[in-house]
Image (cartoon, rainbow, N blue to C red):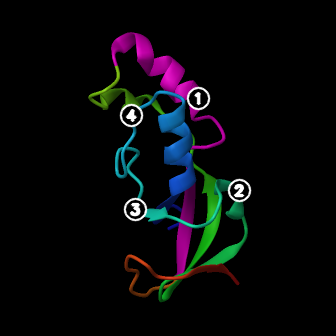
């Protein structure tokens, strides 16, 4: 489907950490964490080679209150955290061509 895979870039985790949010890889539920490209490298409608697969980005992920379950968030921190993720929560993609993806694989726009 259009939301088969979620993609996040490592630079976003670095930005959140710099802002004081102790986010670690996997905390935001991403399927793929990509290093070496900036968050704005990905765009809706574009197709990317991720390892041996092709993925078309279908939509930005909207942050939701499910993130409030993260152990480092107090009740008072939940809404500010969700709000800070507006327009930088990651991307949903549709798998165009299935394939193997591994740490260190090349990511390229096609």
Q: Which of marks 1 and 4 is nearer the N terminus?
A: 4
> Label 4 belongs to which residue?
22
Of all residues, the one furthest to the front in this rendering is 18
* Precedes in sequence: disc 3 or disc 1: 3
Q: Distance between the residues labelled 3 and 2?
A: 18 Å
Q: Distance between the residues labelled 3 and 1?
A: 21 Å
Is residue 105 found left or right of 96 in the rendered image? left
Image coords of residue 47 (percent x, y): 67, 77
| Pointers 1 and 4 in contact (C-beta within 8 Å) | no
Residue pointed to by mark 3: 31
Residue farthest top in this picture = 76
- The answer to which image quadrant residue 39 occupies is bottom right
> In whole angstroms, how far apart are the C-alphas of marks 1 and 2?
16 Å
| Residue at the image point whose x is 34% and y is 51% from the top | 26
For residue 84, the mark is 1
When the figure is inspected, residue 36 is found, relative to residue 60, above or below; the finding is below
**In the rendered image, which quarter contains the C terminus?**
bottom right
Disc 3 from disc 4: Cα separation: 19 Å
């Amino acid at each position: 489907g259009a939301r088969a895979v979620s993609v996040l870039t490592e630079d976003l985790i670095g930005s959140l950490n710099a802002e004081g949010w102790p986010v670690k890889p996997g905390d935001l539920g991403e399927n793929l964490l990509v290093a070496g490209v900036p968050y704005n490298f990905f765009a809706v409608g574009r197709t990317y080679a991720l390892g041996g697969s092709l993925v078309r980005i279908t939509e930005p992920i909207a942050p939701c209150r499910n993130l409030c379950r993260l152990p480092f968030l107090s009740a008072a921190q939940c809404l500010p955290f969700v709000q800070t993720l507006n327009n930088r929560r990651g991307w949903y993609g549709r798998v165009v061509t299935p394939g193997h993806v591994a740490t260190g694989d090349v990511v390229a726009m096609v």
